[in-house]
Image (spheres, helix red, strand yellow):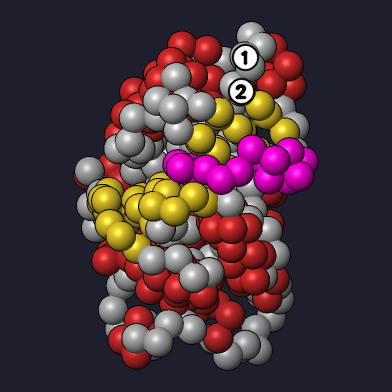
């Protein structure tokens, strides 16, 4: 802790000095004074923050022991089993199941053990992994929505970390929810896990850059200059509970149960270092809450929400 405090003090002093040089009057002297160009002064906080980001002291986005190994089939299967056990509270025997945004399809493949009537994995991009699964009469993977419709209605639908990554304006999110709603059987359940943009690892970059909230501190362009690129589109949700509630309402869905809000403490590091705190608070300039909008309050409540699980019908 002493090391990071010394580092912060040094970096803050450098930024302050640069800002002072920018605003100080130019004195007539015999030898010319070399003043940093405005562009460099404007970037001074980025240079300081960049140094901090790459330091070991910056809090991790995800506990390294909990990161799923993308090359480990066992890790992926364990994760899929966890989703079925912890998110979906329905046994799938003789029921029709749809995984909307199924990725490689591990959840659908695992669901076959529960003997569903039919299990369908849908995604907008075909995964090479689909073709490697053992053929099952009651299992299908497709990028064609017509194929999904053919096997409707569905008793159980899963949208796991999907809504926050649908590209386009809000209407695209509502459209996806409405499409799913039309295929749901009476008394069907839609299980949704949301992953707010203001959470500590929403950027999904933790395999390459395991740094908490880095996407709230640095712009995508700044991260790219450091050699890191955001993995996927992220919908900038700054008030998770209100935003998700509005989406569901506009889609004609009812929240029957808010299953769980996974929270994690936001380290004081982010609110106490001015050049970091100010960058984070700038994302809430459009907030309906005045104290967040004018920067008097740090968005701790919003940032501590990591996942929010819903059951809809």
Q: For residue 155: magenta?
A: yes
**Alpha-carbon span between mark 2 and mark 1:** 5 Å
Q: Which residue, given by chain and number where applicable, does mark 2 sit on?
A: 139
Residue span colored magenta: 144-158
Left or right: 261 with respect to 125? left
Apparent side of residue 143 relative to residue 211 in the rendered image (left or right): right
Tell which of 308 and 251 is nearer to you: 251
x and y percentages locating residue 86 in the rendered image: 30, 34
Up-down relation of residue 108 to residue 237 (above or below): above
Q: Give residue 290's mark.
A: none
Question: Which picture quadrant has residue 256?
Answer: bottom left
Judge by depth and name the residue closer to the eye, 121 or 53.
121
Is 41 contained in the magenta span? no
Name the quarter where the C terminus is drawn: bottom left
Identified at 34% across, 90% down, the residue is 290
With respect to residue 140, does 13 lie above or below? below
Q: Where residue 171 sits: x, y (%)? A: 65, 71
Tell me if residue 1 comes above or below residue 278 in the rendering: above
Q: Nearer the viewer, residue 62 or 177?
A: 177
The residue that appears at 62% across and 14% down in the rendered structure is 136
- Say which residue label 1 marks: 136
Whole-percent x, y for residue 99 in the image: 54, 38
Residue 197 visible, this angle: yes
Q: Which residue shows up at 45% across the image and 66% down it?
A: 253
Say if residue 234 shows up in the picture.
Answer: no
Q: Crowdedness of circle 1 by 10 Å Cα count: few (<14), some, many (20+)?
A: few
Whether tag 2 and tag 1 are in contact, CB under 8 A, the answer is: yes
């Amino acid at each position: 802790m002493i090391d990071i405090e010394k580092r912060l003090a040094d970096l803050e002093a450098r930024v302050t000095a640069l800002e002072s040089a920018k605003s100080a009057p130019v004195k007539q002297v015999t030898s010319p004074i070399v003043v940093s160009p405005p562009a460099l002064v404007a970037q001074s906080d980025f240079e300081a923050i960049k140094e901090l980001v790459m330091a070991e002291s910056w809090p991790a986005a995800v506990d390294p022991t909990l990161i799923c190994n993308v090359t480990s089939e066992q890790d992926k299967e364990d994760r899929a089993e966890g989703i079925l056990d912890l998110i979906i509270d329905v046994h799938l025997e003789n029921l029709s199941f749809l995984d909307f945004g199924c990725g490689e399809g591990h959840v659908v493949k695992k669901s076959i053990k529960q003997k569903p009537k039919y299990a369908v994995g849908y995604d907008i991009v075909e995964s090479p992994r689909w073709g490697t699964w053992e053929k099952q009469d009651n299992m299908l993977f497709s990028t064609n929505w017509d194929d999904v419709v053919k096997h409707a209605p569905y008793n159980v639908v899963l949208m796991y970390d999907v809504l926050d990554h649908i590209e386009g304006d809000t209407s695209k999110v509502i459209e996806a929810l409405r499409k799913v709603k039309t295929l749901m059987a009476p008394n069907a359940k839609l299980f949704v896990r949301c992953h707010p943009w203001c959470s500590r690892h929403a950027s999904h970059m933790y395999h390459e850059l395991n740094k908490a909230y880095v996407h709230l501190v640095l712009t995508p362009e700044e991260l790219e200059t450091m050699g890191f690129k955001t993995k996927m589109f992220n919908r900038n949700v700054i008030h998770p509970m209100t935003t998700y509630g509005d989406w569901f309402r506009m889609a004609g869905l009812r929240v029957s149960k808010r299953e769980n809000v996974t929270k994690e403490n936001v380290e004081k590091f982010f609110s106490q270092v001015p050049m970091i705190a100010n960058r984070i608070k700038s994302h809430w300039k459009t907030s309906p809450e005045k104290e967040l909008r004018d920067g008097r309050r740090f968005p701790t409540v919003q940032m501590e929400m990591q996942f929010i699980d819903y059951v809809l019908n």
